[in-house]
Image: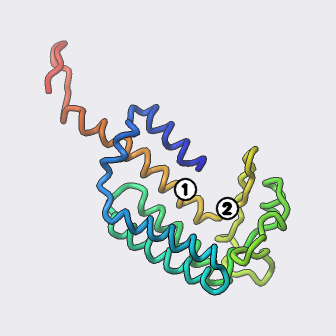
Amino acid sequence: MVVLLVALLVGRAAGGALGALRSLPLQAPQLVVAALLVQLVGAVVGGPVHPLGLAVSAVLVLTFLARNRGLRGTGLVAAGLLLNALVVGANGAMPVSSGAAARAGLTLEDLVVDARHEPADEATRLRLLGDVVPVPLPLRAEVVSPGDVLVAAGLGQLVVAGMLACRRRTLPERVRLDRGSVQP
């Protein structure tokens, strides 16, 4: 959420418009809505439905990203999701670094509260792709993975590029100074 807020502010400061996001040429946005709903149902029902919901949600989001691969930011989001899937697949859950938790001002118990997370230890595979990046925000500290960082960067890029798209469309193709006058 912080990244999206910052992206909105950067987009606006660069002369972009919030309304321009409505004109992003997104293909099949209903896939994202379906992914959120499937993930929500999995979380509410729990048990074996939860990981199944996560898997179906990931397929829906990756399908959405593939269909929108020409938009700035979608490649970063896809790469981040792939990294997260690799580390979770290798370990059965997202490993969380106790050192990163401490640097964020949290305890490992604060972060390993469900079956989706586990403490990282010497048996953890792809440890550097787990939750190893401390984010000591004042109101809500957390620890994220490099994949999460890529997802956030991609979403930020998508928002800023989308906001600036209207500015690019309204500027003349070419403006040059010629003896004190402006000519298109």
Tell me residue 57's x, y (percent).
50, 74
Helix, strand, or loop for circle 1?
helix
Tell me residue 62's x, y (percent).
43, 72
Residue bearing mark 1: 152
Task: Using a 10 Å C-alpha cutoff, classify the residue at mark 2 as few (fewer than 14 neighbours), some (14 to 19) or many (20 or more).
Answer: many
Helix, strand, or loop for circle 2?
strand
Tell me residue 149's x, y (percent).
59, 58
The foreground one among 180 and 6 is 6
What is the three-letter code of the residue carrying label 2? Val
Side (left or right) of 140 relative to 62:
right
Question: Which mark, by number, is residue 1?
Answer: none
The foreground one among 20 and 154 is 20
Residue 83 lies in quadrant: bottom right
- Name above or below for residue 110 compared with residue 91: above
Give the residue drawn at x 67%, y 61%: 144
Give the residue drawn at x 18%, y 36%: 173
Task: Using a 10 Å C-alpha cutoff, classify the residue at mark 1 as few (fewer than 14 neighbours), some (14 to 19) or many (20 or more).
Answer: many
Give the residue drawn at x 77%, y 84%: 123
Tell me residue 120's x, y (percent).
77, 75
Residue 121 lies in quadrant: bottom right
Residue bearing mark 2: 144
Q: Earlier in the sequence, mark 2 or mark 1?
A: 2
Q: CA distance from mark 2 to mark 1?
A: 10 Å
Side (left or right) of 180 relative to 58:
left
What is the three-letter code of the residue carrying label 1? Ala
Circles 2 and 1, Cβ within 8 Å, touching? The answer is yes
Which quadrant of the figure contains the C terminus? top left
Give the residue drawn at x 83%, y 57%: 106
Numbered circles on residues, count: 2
